[in-house]
Image (spheres, coloured by chain):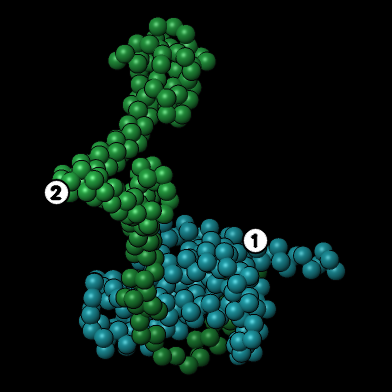
Amino acid sequence: MNGPGDFERELEQELHRILDPIAAAPIPLRRARLSGGIMKRLVGGAGAAIGLKVLTGFAVAAFAAVAAGAATEVAVTGSLNPADWGQQVTQTVQTCKDTLRASGTRGIGPCVSAIAKQHGEQVSDSHQASKARENSGKDNGKGDGKGHDKGNGSGNSIGNGNGNGNGHKPSGSGSNPGSSQSGSSMLFVA
Amino acid sequence: MERVAEYQPGSAADFERLYRNSYRRILGTLVTMLRDRAAAEDCTQDAFERAFKAWKSWRPDAPAEAWLHRIAINVAINGQRRERLQEAGALVLRLGRPSPPADVAAVAERSELLNALRKLPPKQAAAIVLRHFHGYSNREIAISLGVPERTVASRLAAARGRLQRLLEGTRAAPKKNG
């Protein structure tokens, strides 16, 4: 292998020595289609990933709705068992009947209606309380940023975060270890 | 390269003819780029599948085999990446398979040139084979590698230089040891 020409000649000879036997081999049948096909594309890959995410999203949303309803009912009735919730209503109706029978008056409707209304208000209050807790958390999160801009320092974010996490009403710099200036109260007034 | 054959884009019969005419040359190119003949055969089939899917959009202004080579080289480059990632898995899969015909496999595995070619960047190895085995022109190599024609000569020179150094290194090593 002296010059470039020699090298190229040798290269060609060697390539033919190696590749000619391969080129002489019989040609196999051509593979007809990509393995998997349409079903694989639908079941696998990005489609499956997105489908799984959507399903998970629905499952989480459904679970959250059921859990929130159950939590409200537990808060009102004080029991985890749904049978107890129904039983409480039955007992209430029975109490209405007994009261009316004793007083000799007729018409159970207004009594049951009043109790149902009371129950509804309790449930509604419970919902609002939990919403208020969530909202106060969000609002205070926004407020922290403003306060910080007005020169209150990083103490605001720490203090307000603690207060909201515990479900307390924000109260100036009370739970805020890092700020005792007016910036903190301005934040909550705003 | 079959310059005379006329192929009609989208024609299944013409694609079958193209397959028969160019299968061996595509396989020959891929053998120099991939680990072994089995991997090269697999990638060749894969390349023809892809080419068949795109067959309707092939434009006869470029030689069909150069176009096929371009697809095959890209498939082989992806195959190389997969090989590196799944080296252990591939070894397990090969166990128990009937070994390829002894003559071809033995020659291929023993060849210093083949080992050196596999150490080159894939497109450089392909350029060497396209020029020195298939006898492609610069234009055909340019189509096959997906690079401008003016790049081909410099790429070929670089590939030859590197290959020569690799081969000299392999031949010098036993002398030193001996």
Total numbered labels placed on residues in the image: 2
Please tell me whether residue A43 is drawn above or below residue A89 in the rendered image: below
Find the residue positioned furthest to the top. Answer: A182
Q: Are marks 1 and 2 in contact (CB under 8 Å)?
A: no
Residue occupying the point 39% across, 22% down: A169
Observer-nearest of B173 and B58: B58
Observer-nearest of A114 and A160: A114
Find the residue positioned furthest to the bottom. Answer: A26
Which amino acid lies under the numbered mark 2 shown in the image of this protein?
Gly
Observer-nearest of B166 and A181: A181
Which amino acid lies under the numbered mark 1 shown in the image of this protein?
Arg
Position in image of residue A134 (x %, y %): 35, 34
**Quadrant assignment for the N terminus of chain B:** bottom left
Disc 1: which chain?
A: B
Q: Give the side of residue A2 with respect to residue B53, left or right.
A: right
Which chain is represented by green in the image?
A
Residue occupying the point 51% across, 91% down: A25
Sort mark 1 into few (<14), some (14-19) or many (20+) by Cα contacts within 10 Å. few
Quadrant of res A49: bottom left
Chain B, hue in figure: cyan
Q: Give the side of residue A172 with respect to residue B119, left or right.
A: left
What residue does disc 2 label? A107
Position in image of residue B82 (x %, y %): 52, 66
What residue does disc 1 label? B165
**Quadrant assignment for the C terminus of chain B:** bottom right
